[in-house]
Amino acid sequence: MTEHVVSLIWDAWRTRKKGVGAIAQRQRARLADIVAHARANSPHYRELYRDLPDLVESVQQLPVTDKKMLMERFDDWCTDRAVTLEATEALVDDPSRIGEWFLGKYTVMTTSGTTGRRGIFLVDDHTMAVVTAMMLRWIGDWLGPSDFLKIIARRGRMAMVMATGGHFASAVAAARLKQRRGSRIEVLSAHMPTAELVAQLNRFQPALLTPYASMAALLADEQEAGRLDIHPVLLALSAEGLPQAEYGRIARVFNAKIGNSYAASECMFLSAMCDEGWLHINADWVAFEPVDADYRAVAPGEQSHTVLISNLANRVQPILRYDLGDSVLQRPDPCPCGNPLPAIRVQGRSADVLTFRTPGGEVRLPPLALSQAIESIRGVTLFQIAQSDPDGLELRLQIAPAANADAVWREAEAGLRKVLGEHGLERVAIRRGGEPPEQGRGGKFREVIPLSGGRS
């Protein structure tokens, strides 16, 4: 696999250096190849594409897909006929199997139900090689030679602060890295009390820190207050966005380089942030289409209703012209950073930190600390946690018709109580919402809404 990654890095570097035309040529060739593969090996795509010409060279020729459509045809969607929904659900429903290989060759992960249903995604070795190559390309953009020497001097110690207890992309990646790198990787739960998290980071002293964006902002507060005292070379953020000024503050507080990425379980190598604060799409491996509500292309400089992506690497579970649900704005002119890859900003993935009052002062929680307590509960098809007042939460649930609504509610309430209790927030009231979760722009649902955000 190492040789394959090296060749992918070389190809990515050479293609980007040649500019926009070479990037578009690479995308067209890979699109034609993945469409031909999907038609030949996926019964679902064979049926969906039956009226298309033999050679597809433009992504606009393809019909739109989404999570609901593909999950309903899961067995026919996958190109490996040995893959079944029943077998993959057995794996992802077991927390003890996080990071386990499926059928000895596939990585399996889940994504939350922000569009109405849990998604289960398989990743093959080729896709993982592309992910690795793109990550190394990003890190090469973010760091200089002296930064790499500092990381080597600290033996490459990496601390990952993430949601645990589920088959989320970050948790699966952490499990795999832990297997390979052992004591040089510290996996810390975003759910743990801040004081405990700070103590563990102070002990470990990471050279690389990979937190969710909202957690990075909280840790910067702790560093400024003097309780946290770490000196990472790079903070690689993920999952959410922050106001642009926050990135500068975090970098200044830690005296470190900072990078962010916008990605999804459907396409883990989607983009990475440049020094100008724009996210550059890896368009040599992803076809990315900002569109309106009728799936018509919107011009660069206009906010989209949603975005369609085509993952040109994943051959076991092709994701083609897939409605990701995020609203984006594509930069209409070349980015000053000099990167020729398309540059975007994303609306709706902001890190909505919740603040609660306690006798000992304010307690701040990142949204993922709360949402992960609900996501794995069977019977919940959609949820929303809204802060109704400084000391209260409203939990809105959409529950599957076959599930026992009261039992599901009790399990969800208990999950939230556990997280709140771990942070000294036992007094926070949890109210059962009378209305279902409310849809936001682009068809997605904000899972966590802070008090300042009101109702979505």
Image (tube, helix red, strand yellow):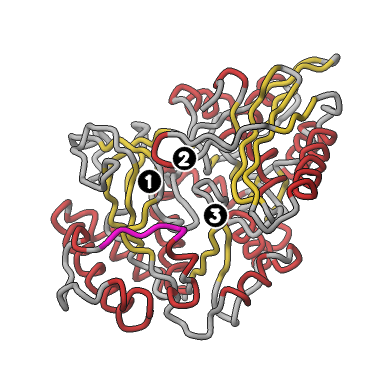
Residue at x-position 71% and y-position 27%: 393
The residue under the point 32% across, 44% down is 280
Mark 3 and mark 1 lie on one chain; the one further toward the N terminus is: 3
Local SS, label 3:
loop
User: Which amino acid is tagged 2?
Assistant: Gly
Counting every numbered tag in the picture gives 3
Measured as percent of width and height from the top left, residue 239 is found at 53, 43
Badge 3 density bin: few <14, some 14–19, many ≥20, Cα 10 Å? some
Query: In the image, which residues are magenta?
Result: 63-68
Residue 41 painted magenta: no
Q: Are marks 3 and 2 in contact (CB under 8 Å)?
A: no
Residue placed under numbered mark 1 in the picture: 141
For marks 3 and 2, the one nearer the N-term is 3
Q: Position of residue 146 (x, y in %)?
A: 47, 44
Between the C-alphas of marks 1 and 2, the distance is 9 Å
Q: Which mark is residue 299?
A: none
What residue does disc 3 label? 117
Task: Look at label 3 and name its amino acid.
Answer: Arg
Which mark is nearer the camera, 1 or 2? Answer: 2
Given residues 182 and 34, the one toward you in this image is: 34
Give the SS element for disc 2.
Answer: strand
Residue 209 visible in the displayed image: no
419 on left or right of 52: right
| Pointer 2 residue | 259
Horizontal side of 383 relative to 257 (left or right) equals: right
Q: Nearer the viewer, residue 351 or 431?
A: 431
The CA distance from mark 3 to mark 2 is 30 Å
